[in-house]
Amino acid sequence: MNESEQKTVNIGLIERPVPPIREFFEEEDLARLSASIRENGILVPLLVRPKGDKFEVIDGDRRLAAAWSAGVREVPIIIRALDDRATHIQRMLANKDRADTDPVSEAKYIARLIVEKIFTAEEYAEKIGRSLDWIADRLAIAEMPEYMQTALANKNIALGVCLEISQVKDASTKERYFREALRSGMTIHAAKISRLMVNEAIDALAESAKPITEENLPPVQIIPQVRCEITGESLPITATQMIRVGIENYKKFRSELGI
């Protein structure tokens, strides 16, 4: 077989990556891609490698899932005879600049490669063009509690906020701060201040043999909220804009709105 060969094969001959770089796909996104494949076919062949008498996906896992959903039975592929190390590098490079990357699945994938000593952190950072700090952040994500990983994968919280709160030393306090960040909103700066303050307090309580309770810890640093007089909705102050208006215009504006 040539180093790179293109052909069309039965979809049953193609297996998902092991391990997968994405643990799940967004349903709406997958449905849109399935509809496109049903109408236009697979426009970009899947990149695969031989695996016995079958093939393993290197790049194109989402297209494979969408093709199954669309009822497609013949799939175009490009075959490359890559070893494990080259495959892992190629997968991450293909995933690198995608806007819809799931950081949790990506983190677990990287952590597995390093834990199983397929790569060192330094080697993998160099191979995929990332910094060691970036790799360290992904390893931290892989070790986060499941409730944090779920919120991060669902894009309910910023990665920077998660990384800060994950460093809170007490498990129950960490979860309480995290829930408050989800409920009220939190900037990365506020998360860092919260983490520094609470860890300092936790250390002090440990030295004095006092219990770690909510009453003995500093409050969570959240984003201040402001209430809209028109809708009654509470919004983070970072989402508002301050403007100067004359008193007569202000009175007229309120009168027109009936408030």
Image (cartoon, rainbow, N blue to C red):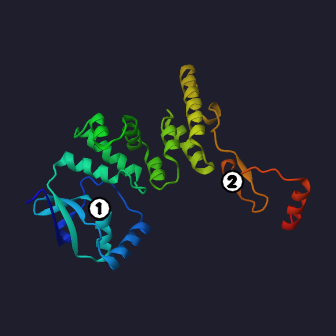
Estimate how packed mark 1 is, as few (under 14), some (14 to 19) or many (20 or more) residues with alpha carbons within 10 Å: many
Q: On the image, numbered disc 2 is attached to which residue?
A: 235
Q: Kindly indicate the quadrant of the structure image that contains residue 63.
A: bottom left
Can you give x and y, in whole percent of width and height, for residue 30 in the image? 38, 68
User: Mark 1 = which residue?
Assistant: 61
- Left or right: 188 as drawn, with respect to 55: right
* Residue 40 spot, x, y in % from top left: 33, 77
Q: On the picture, is 147 further left or further right than 52? A: right
Q: Is residue 35 above or below residue 23?
A: below
Q: Residue shown at 42%/67% (left/top)?
A: 29
Residue farthest along the right direction in this orientation: 248
User: Which residue is at the far top?
Assistant: 207
**Total numbered badges shown on the rendered structure:** 2
The C terminus lies in which quarter of the figure? bottom right
Which structural element holds mark 2? strand
Which residue appears at 57% of the width and 49% of the height? 182
Furthest-bottom residue in this view = 39
Amino acid at pointer 2 = Leu
Residue 255 in the figure: left or right of residue 8: right
For label 2, count other residues whose C-alpha is less than 10 Å away and answer few (under 14), some (14-19) or many (20+).
some
Q: What's under tag 1, amino acid-wise?
A: Asp
Give the residue drawn at x 40%, y 53%. 102
Q: Is residue 83 left or right of residue 191?
A: left
Rendered view: 16 above or below 212: below
Q: Quadrant of residue 256?
A: bottom right
For the N terminus, the quadrant is bottom left
* Residue 106 rendering spot, x and y as whole percentages: 35, 49
Residue nearer the viewer, 57 or 44: 44
Q: Disc 1 to disc 2, how far (Cα)?
A: 39 Å
- The residue lying toward the viewer, choosing from 168 and 138, is 138
Choose the circle earlier in sequence order: 1 or 2. Answer: 1
Q: Secondary structure at mark 1?
A: helix
